[in-house]
C-alpha cells in the first residue's frame, strides 16, 4: 500500500528538517503526499498496521522529542494547497498557508479576517486548534470542514454552535482535516 503512494515515503526521517524550531528526532514513517488519494492510502495502511498517525502542517510552533515519533507522520504542507475564491467565500485545502489565504483575500478586496494575521499555520492546523486572537478565531469564518476518516472515507462537518471552542474543533478522532 505504501508503494502505491505517488508522493514521497521516507523511513526514519528527522523531523528537525520539518519544524520551524529545527528540533526533533525521526518519524518511523514520514509521508509527503501529493493529493488526497495519497493521504487516503497512508491512512488505510496505518489503520491496517495499527500505527498511530500524526499530522504535520508547516511545522510551526511544534516541539518534537529527540527520540522522535513512533508510527506515521503525514505532512500536509505543500499538499492540499488548492485555493478557489467564489465571491466572498473560499474553498481551501488543509495544506495551504493561512497567511497566503489572507493575502489572496485582501488582494480581492475581501476583509474581516484581520484577527488571523501573523498566525503561522496551515489551514488544517488553524482549523484543528481554532487559531485566533482576542478579536476572533478561524471558526468564526467557517461554513464547512471536510476531513478524511481513518478508513479512507470523506466526511463533512457544517459547524453548529459549539463545534469550535477555545483552541479546538470537535471533529472525529483519527480524522485528517482536508480543508
Image (spheres, rainbow, N blue to C red):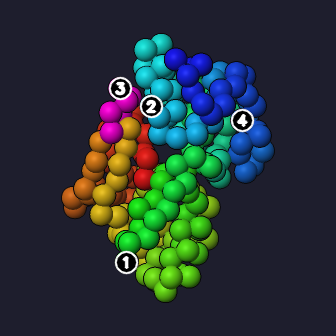
Q: Give the spatial CA distance, label 3 vs label 1.
A: 34 Å
Above or below — where is 68 with respect to 112?
above
Secondary structure found at label 3: loop
Above or below — where is 72 with respect to 132?
above
Q: Earlier in the sequence, mark 1 or mark 4?
A: 4
Q: Residues within 10 Å of mark 3 (few under 14, many from 20)?
A: some
| In magenta segment, residue 111 | no
Q: Which residue is mark 3?
A: 151
Q: Which residue is mark 2?
A: 40
Q: Which residue is mark 4?
A: 15
Secondary structure found at label 4: helix
Between 108 and 68, the residue placed more toward the observer is 108
Q: Is residue 62 visible?
A: yes
Marks 3 and 4 in Cβ contact (< 8 Å): no
Magenta-drawn segment: 149-154
Above or below — where is 113 with respect to 65?
below
Name the magenta segment's main secondary structure: loop
Q: Residue 44: percent from the left, percent from the top? A: 43, 23
Q: Is residue 70 visible?
A: no
Amino acid at each position: 500500500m505504501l508503494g502505491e503512494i505517488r508522493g514521497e515515503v521516507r523511513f526514519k526521517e528527522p523531523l528537525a528538517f520539518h519544524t520551524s524550531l529545527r528540533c526533533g528526532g525521526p518519524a518511523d514513517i514520514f509521508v509527503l503526499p501529493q493529493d488526497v488519494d495519497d493521504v487516503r492510502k497512508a491512512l488505510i495502511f496505518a489503520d491496517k498496521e495499527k500505527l498511530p498517525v500524526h499530522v504535520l502542517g508547516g511545522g510551526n510552533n511544534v516541539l518534537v522529542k529527540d527520540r522522535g515519533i513512533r508510527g506515521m507522520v503525514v505532512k500536509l504542507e505543500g499538499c492540499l494547497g488548492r485555493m478557489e475564491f467564489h465571491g466572498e467565500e473560499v474553498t481551501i485545502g488543509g495544506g495551504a498557508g493561512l497567511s497566503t489565504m489572507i493575502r489572496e483575500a485582501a488582494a480581492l478586496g475581501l476583509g474581516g479576517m484581520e484577527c488571523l494575521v501573523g498566525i503561522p499555520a496551515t489551514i488544517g492546523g488553524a482549523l484543528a486548534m481554532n487559531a485566533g486572537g482576542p478579536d476572533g478565531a478561524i471558526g468564526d469564518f467557517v461554513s464547512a470542514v471536510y476531513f478524511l476518516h481513518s478508513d479512507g472515507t470523506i466526511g463533512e462537518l457544517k459547524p453548529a454552535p459549539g463545534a469550535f471552542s477555545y483552541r479546538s474543533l470537535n471533529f472525529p478522532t483519527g480524522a485528517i482535516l482536508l480543508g
